[in-house]
Image: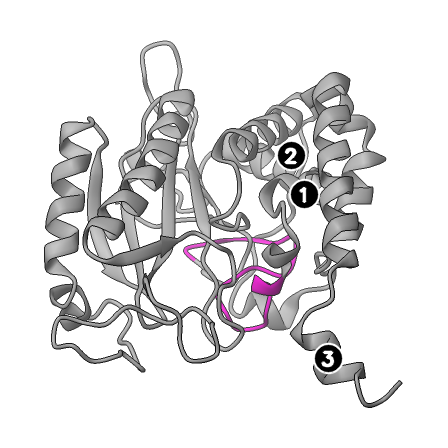
Amino acid sequence: MACELEFYLLDARRDHNGRPQPALDADGGRPRHTQVYGLRELEQIEPFLADLYSACKLHGIPARTAISEYAPGQVEITLEHGDALEAMDQAVRYKRLVKAVAHKHGMQATFMAKPFDHLAGTGMHMHVSLADAEGRNLFASEDPAGTPLLRTAIGGMLASLLDSLLLFCPNANSYRRFQANSYAPLAPTWGVDNRTVSLRVPGGPANTRHIEHRICGADANPYLAAAAILAGIHRGIKEDIDPGEPVQGNGYAQAKELLPTDWLTSLTALEKSAWAREALGQEFLGVYLAVKRAEYRQFMAEVGEQDWRWYLTEA
């Protein structure tokens, strides 16, 4: 497996309304627009990136390609694939390093799923393949859609998606990321080299064939997300689940069934899931759901700016 984590670099200071704002660039200005994959955007944060890569190297974290994402101050750095547990260890350590290096440079790094309502959300794309005892990729195929084993793995993940969603999107803010045409998936769909679906089989050489799971927010716990993904793959292989035909073209426009976009529905789905109890264990689920129920109640009890904007003069 491998984690592909997006994050925002913020100014350590809040704006005049006390709200977070993108970090100043190297020229001392506040970026208002960004070019995805832009080189200038990366040049503006080169001192931060140099220190981050150096820290990753010292900690044995295989950080590779950096790209600018869809919003000012939004960055993604790819981590190399490896053993599933080791890859999740690296993802957690990497998040800590990003925050520490940002602090050193007078910035704040956040992996919050949707820090700004008008800007892109931040995701954690999970890449996964299966190897045999000799380390050969069991998904490898000249067919861009992969092997029959890959298809059943996708079938299991799709069948388990609703039951797993609270592990992929664990917080109230996680669901604000789900907006049409935002490159955040909205439906239980899969496709080949298609960024409008939830489960993507990337292009590339046959020996690199794998699945990119695009649902998780960057706020997800990598260990729990990986556990749910692997349990879904196991289910698909064990039950020989057919995922159906891959989506061609715009997956948003073709979606027949949408994922829930609220915290409570996902919480209830996990709570009622017999598959999750068997796959993840009743003891774990009992603790996790109790924590999430308490968080949900606390979140719903807090009165904030939107309440005042909507209801203060209407009630």
Q: Which mark is residue 139?
A: none
Looking at the image, residue 313 sits to the left or right of residue 224; the answer is right
Q: Amino acid at mark 3?
A: Trp
Spot occupied by residue 135 in the image (x, y as percentages of width and height): 32, 16
Name the residue tied to disc 2: 156
Query: Measured along the vertical axis of the image, is residue 141 above or below residue 5?
Result: above
The residue sitting at the right extreme is 315
Q: Amino acid at mark 2?
A: Gly
Name the residue tied to disc 3: 308
Pick the quarter of the image with the N terminus: top left
Spot occupied by residue 25 in the image (x, y as percentages of width and height): 19, 72
Q: Secondary structure at mark 3?
A: helix
Q: Nearer the viewer, mark 3 or mark 2?
A: 3
What span is in magenta? 176-193
Q: Secondary structure at mark 1?
A: helix
Q: Nearer the viewer, residue 73 or 197?
A: 73
Q: Residue 191: within the magenta? A: yes
**Rendered residue at 61%/48% (across/down):** 169
**Rendered residue at 77%/37% (across/down):** 270
Query: Measured along the vertical axis of the image, is residue 107 above or below residue 20?
Result: above
Name the residue tied to disc 1: 166
**Rendered residue at 42%/80% (across/down):** 16
Query: Measured along the vertical axis of the image, is residue 74 above or below residue 199?
Result: below
Identify the mark nearer the N-term, 1 or 2: 2
How packed mark 2 is, by other alpha carbons closer than 10 Å (few <14, some 14-19, many 20 or more), is: many
Q: Nearer the viewer, mark 1 or mark 3?
A: 3
CA separation in Å, label 1 and label 3:
29 Å
Q: Does residue 140 appear anywhere in the picture?
A: no
Query: Residue 166 is drawn in which quadrant?
Result: top right
